[in-house]
Each structure stands twice: as C-alpha cells, then as structure tokens.
Amino acid sequence: MDPDERLRFKQQVEKAGFIKNFDVKLRKRDGTEIDCVLTSSIQKVEDGSILGYQGFIWDITERKRAEKELEEERNVLRTVINNVPDYIYVKDNEGRYVMSNNAHVSFLGAVKPEEVIGKTAFELFPQDLAEKYHADDQEVIRSRKPIINREELSTDETGKKVWNIMSKVPLRDSSGKIIGMVGIARDLTKRKEAEEKIKNYSKNLESMVEERTRELNRALFDTEQARDRIDGILKSVGDSLIVTDLYNRVILMNRSAEDLLGIRLSEVIDRPIDFAIEDKTLRDRIKTTLDKKKSGYQFDFELPGEDSEHHRIIRAGTSVIEDRTGKQTGIITTMHDVTYEREIDRMKTEFISTAAHELRTPLTSIQGFSELLKIRDDMTEDERKECLSYINAQSVNLAAIINDLLDISRIESGKGFSLDKAPCNIAELIREMVPSFQVQSKKHQFDLILSEEPIEMMADIDKMRQVFENILSNAVKYSPEGGEIRITGEIVEDRYQVSIEDKGIGMIPDQVERIFDKFYRADYSNTAIPGTGLGMNIVKYLVEAHGGEMRVESEVGKGTTVRFTIPL
Amino acid sequence: MKKVLIVDDHAEVRRLVEMTLRVGDYKILQAQNGQEAIEIARNKKPDLIIMDIMMPGNMDGLEATRILKDDPETKDSIIIMLTAKGQEFDKEKGLEAGADDYFTKPFSPLELIKKVEEVLED
C-alpha cells in the first residue's frame, strides 16, 4: 500500500474504530497493482492499546476494468448520439423526456439538455401537436409496435412549419419491461422544399412543353393550311408543273403534270427526275437550268401521242426558284400541250400557201389569156370568146375565194354576219341552183328528192345559196369519178332537213371529225383539188346562225353525206 | 416539127399553153397526169415536156420527171417544170428530179414562148 494511503487508512480506522469500503490500490507480491476495497476494524486489547486490524479485502480490479469499459462505451455512444444531425430522444412511460441529444435540444430551441429533461411535449409544443405526439408515444408504448419512417408536419422553435421524418420504438429495460420509448427524427423540410420545387418545376416544364406543343401545332396547322392552299392553287393550274430540288429530285407535280407525263407523284417523289421524265431534252434542260441561272429555258419537246404517228408537242419553261433571301432552292418547270396550237399554226401556214395557190390558178388564166388577146391578132372570133369566158369565169372564181377569206376573217374577228332574213322556199332555191352544177360537170347525175308541199321559212336567201354552193361543189370535187349526187329535202319534226349525198372518195373518221375545223382540208396533201379549207367552216357557221344543225357522215370509197336542218 | 408535151391536170392551163405556143411550128401533145405523160413520152418521144408539179393521183410532176429522166428511152426529152412562183423549194426539187429548167405560174405567154424557143434552139 502506498504510504500516504496507508496513513489515510490508519487515521480513518483509528478515529472511527472501523472503515468500510475503502478504495485502495495494493501491490501484490509479484509487483502488479490491483484495485481493492477494504473493510476493516481495529482489534484492541483491554488497555485500549491496538492489537491489530481485522477485516476483508476485495479484489475489484476486474470490476473496475468493466466499469471503465462501460464508461468508455457510453462515451462513444453519447458522442455519436450527440453529433448525429438526427433528433434522438428518450421518453419514459409518462411522456417525460429522459434523454435528448444536441440536435433535438436545439430543435426544441433549448441550449442544454437540462432544459428539456423531465418536461413533456405539452410544455414544449403547441397543444395540438403535443396531443398528437403524446398519442403516438402512448400508442407505441401500449402496442409495443414501432412507428418507422413516418413523414409529418411539425413546427420548429420559431413556429415555422417543418417536415420531419420520424420513427418511434418502445424502450425496454433488461427484464423486458417497457419503460418508455425512443424517438428518432430528421428534418425533411429542405428535401420537401426541393421536391416541391422539382414538382413545381416539372409542372412548369410540363405546361411550358404543353404551350410549346400548342404553338407548334398551331404553326404546323398554319403551315399545312398554307401548303394546302398552295397545293390547291398548283393543282388547279391548267399548265403542268414539276418542282425539282437542287439535286434534281422530284418534289412536286400537279395533277396536270401527272396526266401529261403519265406518272403519279407518289411513284417518283424524292427520286431523281430520270425516273419521272423519259424525254432527254426536258431532263437535260431541267438539270442545266441551275447553271443558266435566272433566265431559265423556253423550249419545245415531244411526247408520244395516241399513236406512233401523232406526237404531242409540249412547250416547256424552266426557272430557278429562290427563297426570300435569294438562295436557290430548286427549279420549277411548266409545261403546256401546244399540239393543237402548233397544228393551227401549221394549218395557217398551209392555208396561206393554199390560198396563194388558189389565187395563182385563176390568175394564171386571167394573165395568160388576157395577154394572148392583147398580142395575137390571128385569133378567130370563137377563140377570142373562149379566152374571154376563161377570164370571166376565173374572175368570178377569184371573187369567190376572196369572199371566203373575208367571211372567215369576219367570223374570226367575232363580228359574224348580219342575216337578212326573209320568207323563202329552200326547195325552190335547190331546184334553181342544181342546173348550173349539172352544166359544169357532165360526169355527175344530180337527183332531186324534194317534198312537194310548199315550204316557207325565214332565211337569208344569199347565205343559203352560199351554203348549197359550198356543199355541192365539195360533192363534185370529191367524187372525181362522177356518179349520182342525191339531194333530199324533207320536213323532219319542226325542221327542214337537207341531205346531199355523193358517191365519191369519202373520208376516214378522223377527217370527218375535223371537217369543220378552220383551215382544215381533208386532202391537204392533195393540192390539186382546189379549196381554201374554209368552206365547211363558213357553211357550219351560217347554218348555225340560222338556228340549224349540221352533220357529216362519210366512208372511204363509198361517199359522203352532208346533212343540215333549218328551223321552220 | 418539134413535139411539145403539155402535162397539167387543168384543161384550161393546157389550152393556155397550147394557144401560147401556136406562134411556133410545134406539134402539141397533152397529158393530164404523170402516168399519161410517161406513156405519151415513151410513144411519141417529145422534144420538150412542159410539166406541172402539182397534179392529183399517185404521181405528181416531180415523180414523173424522175422516171422520165431515168429511162434511157425518154431521158433526152427536155423538161421544163411549171412551178408556183416564189416556191424556191419546188424549183430545187424540180431541178433535183432532173428537170432542165423551170417556169413560174402565173406566167406571161410571151416569156414562155421565149423560154421554149431558147431551150429548143439547139
């Protein structure tokens, strides 16, 4: 025993006569120090002199060590408990705080645990919250079932609303008896706020997306409407249109172009024009339009027609498409079937040369015979008369040709004829006219089949004469071998119908179809048969001007029948 | 007496040429189409043929001229084509077909006589 300890022990035991539970460190014989507790009393003899000390020594080294370990463990636990950010507290069965860690203490607005220990929730929270907490606590204690991770609203020391996540578990002593509960809680406010923020943000985002989508849809709708409108315009344009991009791919074709080229846009869209257009001229022009820049091309090309002999002539134009900034975006090609116009042009040229030829024939006679009359004085009287009759007949012929030309120009200009209508008898007119034709052509036999009853109608007698002259001279011209020319006049319903039937060369259906076309001559390759190609056009016009109708039937090698009606 | 064949589908024109040539000592032959012209040319060997280009039927004046000039029997006949005035195209075709000369319609009878005398001189 340490000498000082020994002295202290001695004084105490001598003063009181005994000592109880005296903590002391003793040294064993081998030198190791042990913790001991002494309980001792003095043994005195009669005279009061000290005989010695009697007592017990307990070696408590082991107990001390266990206590120390426990203390250290507690210290670790306390340190942990006090330093976690979670709120940790313990309440007894009556709801009084038995323990409160630092986080919990400061959550309650206190500084030291002592301000909390021994109090109940009713002293630290508003009434409603306190009641709720107390009920929860009692429920855990009663049911012995824990509450785990429940999120709930609370208020902090300043009264601000806070979100907590809390767990409450029953607390038992070593015998298993419930002695209270342990609570652990954590502040969720920040997370909740963040969640809320995210929720709001995503809600906001959603509505933004919705708004954008709406705008896009609106824009899309507008664009589609605009495109529909443009499509509608393009489709309604009579001319054929093809739009190609900078890489010569087909972007658009209107209906007219589809029909013209005999393909559908759906078959060639986004494909090179080589798939859409067979004609090399057209393809090459489209492809080189970009190099040529703004002016583009104007050109004709041919497409196969109904049969191998009849090509369609197409007038095409290409031009570069530029956007608002002047950037080139493609090529638009317009096409227009000009077969008919070209045919008209051809017929006009043909007509001019035919008309010139027609004028030349009478002029040859007039110039020739008149010059002979002038320079010859050896002619007989009969020969002179012969020459004069040629000159006279050809002058009349010339006048007729000129009248035809004037008539057609009158019809062309839209002025038309002013009909000088008066009561007249068509049958009578026919009877009157036929003999002069019969005289001119001995090869033909004119047969008249005319109804006997007197027919009267309102007509311009001169124009009707012109109509008959034309039809009869055609009948004669186109039946060069001669034969019967039958003229029938009869009443059909409320009309007078005249048919002139020859046994001539006739026409193929195509020629019949075009017989009323201006400048058209069924036999234009055969210029030996005189005619301007205007007669039938004029005749039809005159018949229709009288309110009548006209029809032609013909068969090659059999002959032609011209039939017309005039209202009574 | 020189023989002159007049080929034209218009009787009136044949009559005009005939009356025009009456001043000379010519034997006048007439044909109204190409085929007839070839037949007469082979039989009568005319010195001169005055040939209209435009005639109806299968054979026009050009074709008849070509055939006559290809045939050794008839190729010596001089051929004057009667062409429409101003139709250079026809003139060229006529000469190509083998015609020796051409004359345009309408014509002056005096000039036709001169032309005929000119080609028949040698």
Image (cartoon, rainbow, N blue to C red):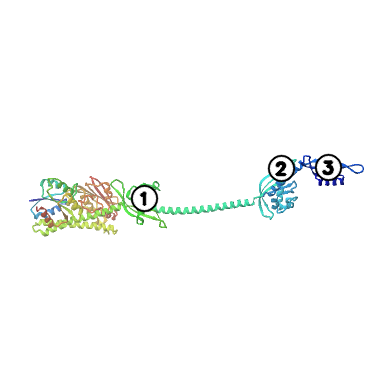
Question: Nearest the camera: A543 or A368?
Answer: A368
Q: Is residue B65 left or right of residue A237?
A: left
The picture places residue B105, in percent across and down from the top left corner, at: 17, 55
Q: Secondary structure at mark 1?
A: helix
Q: Which is more N-terminal, label 1 or label 3?
A: 3
Question: Nearest the camera: A452 or A295?
Answer: A295
Chain at numbered mark 1:
A
**The disc labelled 1 sits on which kind of residue?**
Ala
Q: Quadrant of residue A2?
A: top right
Say which mark, if any, is on residue A141: none
Q: Is residue A295 left or right of residue A10?
A: left
Residue at the spot of label 2 = A144
Labels 2, 1: front one: 2
Label 3 and label 1: CA atoms lie apart by 127 Å
Residue at the spot of label 1 = A257
Outermost residue, top direction?
A30
Q: Secondary structure at mark 3?
A: strand
Q: A28 above or below A291?
A: above
**The disc labelled 3 sits on which kind of residue?**
Thr
Chain at numbered mark 3:
A
Q: Which is more N-terminal, label 1 or label 2?
A: 2
The picture places residue A266, in percent across and down from the top left corner, at: 40, 47
Question: Nearest the camera: A58 or A167?
Answer: A58
Residue at the spot of label 3 = A39
Chain at numbered mark 2:
A
